[in-house]
Image (cartoon, grey):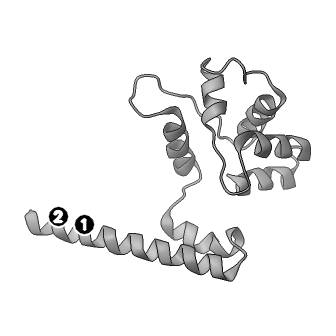
């Protein structure tokens, strides 16, 4: 999401002030959480609704095409719905993420750690798939 926001700032669709307020509102340096924004939008956090951070986030999400509606008729939590839609909208895949790693993680040691985690995850997924194929 940070990349999408930065691209919107670079294109002039989002102000630097809105970018800063959104990042501050959504979380820390390491991760962004849309949970409180979505809860406020759905009326579950009136203490947050209408604040500067909330309003900036609403403008930014609208500008990047990520102001997805929430579905109240599912067991999936609002933030899970958001990230599912975000991944679909931006066509985020593991292959794409691997290609973007140099831009996302500048420290070579941390990048190697992430690549190792991805490789481990893929090995586990391959083992699960092989086990499923044996049972069929």
Q: What element carries label 1?
A: helix
Q: Residues within 10 Å of mark 1 (few under 14, many from 20)?
A: few
**Disc 1 + disc 2, Cβ < 8 Å:** yes
With 135 as the anchor, is 117 left or right in this view?
A: right
Image quarter where the C terminus lies is bottom left
Residue 57, horizontal then vertical, whole percent: 75, 36
Q: Which residue is depicted at the point 65% across and 21% down?
A: 45
On screen, 2 above or below 105?
above
| Rendered image quadrant of residue 25 | top right
Camera-side residue: 91 or 19? 19
Q: Which residue is depicted at the point 32% across and 70% down?
A: 124
| Rendered image quadrant of residue 129 | bottom left
On screen, 38 above or below 107?
above
Camera-side residue: 112 or 16? 112
Camera-side residue: 3 or 28? 28
Residue 30, horizontal then vertical, whole percent: 68, 57
The span from disc 1 to disc 2 (Cα, nearest Å) is 6 Å
On screen, 130 above or below 17?
below
Q: Is mark 2 on a helix, strand or loop?
A: helix
Q: Which residue is depicted at the point 78% across and 55% down?
A: 7
Task: Tell me the number on the disc at residue 73.
Answer: none
Task: Tell me the number on the disc at residue 132.
Answer: 2
Camera-side residue: 113 or 119? 113
Residue 74, horizontal then vertical, whole percent: 39, 28
Residue 92 can be seen, yes or no: yes
Task: Tell me the number on the disc at residue 128.
Answer: 1
Residue 133, horizontal then vertical, whole percent: 15, 67
With 135 as the anchor, is 36 left or right in this view?
A: right
């Amino acid at each position: 999401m940070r990349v999408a926001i930065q691209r919107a700032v670079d294109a002039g669709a989002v102000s630097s002030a809105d970018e800063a307020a959104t990042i501050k509102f959504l979380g820390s340096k390491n991760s962004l959480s849309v949970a409180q924004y979505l809860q406020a939008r759905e009326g579950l956090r009136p203490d947050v609704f209408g604040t500067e951070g909330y309003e900036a986030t609403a403008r930014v999400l609208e500008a990047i095409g990520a102001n997805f509606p929430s579905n109240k008729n599912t067991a999936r939590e609002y933030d899970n719905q958001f990230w599912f839609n975000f991944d679909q909208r931006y066509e985020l895949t593991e292959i794409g993420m691997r290609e973007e790693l140099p831009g996302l993680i500048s420290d070579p040691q941390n990048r190697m750690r992430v690549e190792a985690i991805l490789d481990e995850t893929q090995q586990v997924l391959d083992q699960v798939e092989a086990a499923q194929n044996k049972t069929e």
